[in-house]
Image (tube, helix red, strand yellow):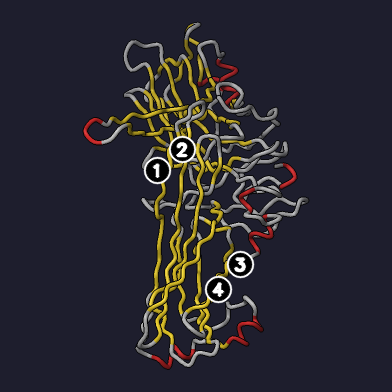
Amino acid sequence: MAIFSNKGHTSAVTVSVHPRTTKVVVQQGEASNVLVGYVRVQVHRAIEMSSLVVQFVGTQQLDMRVGQGPSSSQYSIRAPCADLTHTIATNTTSSDSVAAAMLASLSRVRSGGRSDITSPPSFKSYAEEETHSALSLSSFSSTSASSVELREGEYRFVFELELPPRLPSSVKSELGGVEYHVGAVLRRPTLFQNTVEAHVDVQVVQAPPLHPGSHLLFGHASFAALASTSLSFDARVREGWRVFVSSPSSQALFVGAPLKLYVYLTREGSDKQLELTEFGVTLHETITHMIPGSAAQQTTERVLTTSSLCPLTSDKQRDAGHVLDAQTIDALGESFNELPSTGALTLWLPQTGPQAVHPTAVSRMFAVAHRLTITVRVCEVGGYPSRVSFATRVLVLPEALAPGDQLAAPLPCYSRVNGDVVLESAARPDSAISVNPPAYATLSNL
């Protein structure tokens, strides 16, 4: 299992924080959102420790420009998303209690402590088998009332953080974004180098509200109906021709998964040859930033990814063989997958890089929406070109789901994403981090 870490060190001690995952799927409803990991303290020579703290911090930043030209000015607004702090060990912690914490239990913090987000329901019990051999009681010794002595060696302090259920998703844009990190701070009762810090960036993904009636379902009665309805468009062009665009995908797209599109030309009485000169698809992303308690609002739109196909048309016989008659299309309806298409293309939704796609999200701090535009350009031999465009709103999810949102069963699971293990919701006392945890709570709990 992948472990992520970042180090802070001095000549005497090195501190690193190791969350089990850097991608957190925040559940809604009564489910508890738990981030598990451990803080590793490597002592190169004996030191005294006054406290060890684990933190989960989230911040939204909005960069704004006022005025125009040389007199314009730019400033930034920062607002906290989460500020959770839990002390694993302090100067009043006995050596027995510190060692016992390492041997058996998990250090945990509830989101009701220091956070401007609504507190979740009470925390349920959570247990995990720790395979690392913890140090014995003799590894600790209390030297004074203000510190705990750590002898040379390696220490692992396991933590468990319960996160607020309404955290906004992580996002990056030209106007700022939302960022999170989990960190550890070790303090020493010394005059110099008295603080050692380490942190790891964490990506938070908000589970979208997919309950019946949600505007994210685009009028469909349920997520199952949305995910099982394929994308398809048709239009008449020139005289005696129809253009069909079809995809096995639906209006629910998935980051990291390809979107495949096919175009079909159908003759409806025309005796002229029609050529496909352009077939393209573009995904647009609109991010609206809002600052709580302020009227400030900024919106930015960017073209995330685009793909186009211009097939060769020198082989007229080959193109003619891909033309379907109207009776065949009417008989088959929208089942085009196994038919020869005039053109086909694949659009990828990348997870990383400058063209990374953010999942669709709605929160009080910002909203992310997506729109898909499809363009088809055809031309009769010896004639003028004709252009047809289609546009529709789409829902972009972090990972592929199957249409299975029955009220009695949870929606399908996430799997590994670039080596990340997606966080499981600790809804049962005996639950634990797994490779394929449930991605969303059941619709009845939303």
Disc 4 element: strand
Q: Residue furthest front?
A: 239
Amino acid identity at mark 1: Ser
Disc 2 element: strand
Q: Earlier in the sequence, mark 2 or mark 1?
A: 1
Q: In this figure, which residue is indicated by the disc labeled 4?
A: 234
Residues at discs 1 and 4 in contact (Cβ within 8 Å): no
Residue for point 57% across, 65% down: 249
- Seen in the picture, residue 388 relative to 379 is either above or below; the reply is above
Q: In this figure, which residue is indicated by the disc labeled 3?
A: 230
| Number of residues whose C-alpha sits closer than 10 Å to that of mark 1, classed few (under 14), some (14–19) or many (20 or more) | some
Amino acid identity at mark 3: Ser
Q: Position of residue 61 (x, y in %)?
A: 41, 32
Q: Is residue 48 left or right of residue 35?
A: left
Q: Earlier in the sequence, mark 1 or mark 4?
A: 1
Amino acid identity at mark 2: His
Q: In this figure, which residue is indicated by the disc labeled 2?
A: 289
Disc 3 element: strand
Q: Position of residue 79 (x, y in %)?
A: 46, 27
Residues at discs 2 and 1 in contact (Cβ within 8 Å): yes
Amino acid identity at mark 4: Asp
Q: Earlier in the sequence, mark 3 or mark 2?
A: 3
Q: In this figure, which residue is indicated by the disc labeled 1?
A: 173
Q: Is residue 263 left or right of residue 166?
A: left
Cα separation, mark 2 vs mark 1, equals 10 Å
Residue nearest the observer in this picture, 326 or 189: 326
Residues at discs 1 and 3 in contact (Cβ within 8 Å): no
Residue for point 43% across, 42% down: 299
Q: Position of residue 43 (x, y in %)?
A: 40, 25
Q: Is residue 251 left or right of residue 122?
A: left
